[in-house]
Image (cartoon, rainbow, N blue to C red):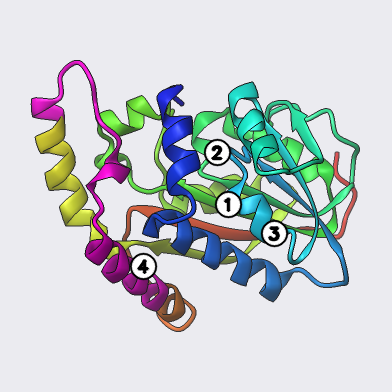
Amino acid sequence: MKKYLYEDLYLLEEKHWWHISKREAVLSLIKEYAKGNRIKILDVGCGTGRNMEEFKKLGDVWGLDSSLIALNYCRKRGLKNLKLGSAENTSLETSSFDVVTLLDVLEHTDDNKTLKEMARILKRNGILILTVPAFPWLWSKWDEVLHHKRRYTINTFKKMLDSYDFHPVKMTYLYSFLVLPTLIIRKIKQKFSKNFYPSDFTLSTPLLNFILNNLSRLEFFLSGKFYIPFGTSIVVVAKKNDQKTT
């Protein structure tokens, strides 16, 4: 991720609808699928740490990121249990976490190495929660700015999880209402922003923030009752099988 985007992330994680809605969705999923008291949670690619602050309400939280800049922002929030490392090789103990979150991180890494490492560090029956960008045909300059390697479909995810010690317990597209606006806005920005591509998060206003946040909450609620066939993101909850990881 570009260096200037860490400051952007630190300032907007608290108030931007996209960060808020994703955080609320993941908190809800942890509560629903992770069992036990004071669960041990690892946020891989923890960024500037706002999600970690919320996850602390549910258990003991660790954060891992490959960027010292990101970890320094986490320390600015007063967070501890921070580790410099990559999703592909965390150097953490085997079978040490009840929940691992991988939120808009997998697309930056080698899928095979990362999923294998997540299976290694999760306890048996542990929960992996992922969010990733959806559909290769939505690829834009914004993906390049964020250093994405790919975008996904639910079908590609199903095939990947079949190769590891995971089985999906929930998979859904989200932000279906953003697909058409995203296509239009990013094409316009790409045409007129040749040398510097401004952050997509700067497009929000207080009113738009309110509307989109509530639309997101409604859509996430509906995703538990109906199949949502498209969106700009995918949310996956996968359970580590009750068997030894090899």
Residue 115 position (above or below residue 178): above
Does the image show residue 152? yes
Is the stretch drawn in magenta largely helix, strand or loop? Answer: helix
* Front of the two marks 3 and 1: 3
Q: CA distance from mark 4 to mark 3?
A: 20 Å
Q: CA distance from mark 3 to mark 1?
A: 15 Å
* Mark 4 / mark 1, whichever is N-terminal: 1
Q: Return the mark for residue 213.
A: 4
Give the amino acid type for the residue marked by disc 2 in the picture.
Val
Q: CA distance from mark 2 to mark 1?
A: 8 Å
* Mark 4 / mark 3, whichever is N-terminal: 3
**3 left or right, relative to 112:** left
SS assignment at label 4 = helix
| Residue bearing the label numbered 3 | 55
Give the amino acid type for the residue marked by disc 4 in the picture.
Asn
* Front of the two marks 4 and 2: 4
**Image coords of residue 35 (percent x, y):** 81, 72
**Which portion, as a residue range, is magenta?**
190-219
Q: CA distance from mark 4 to mark 2?
A: 22 Å
| Residue bearing the label numbered 2 | 105
What is the quadrant of the C terminus in the image? top right
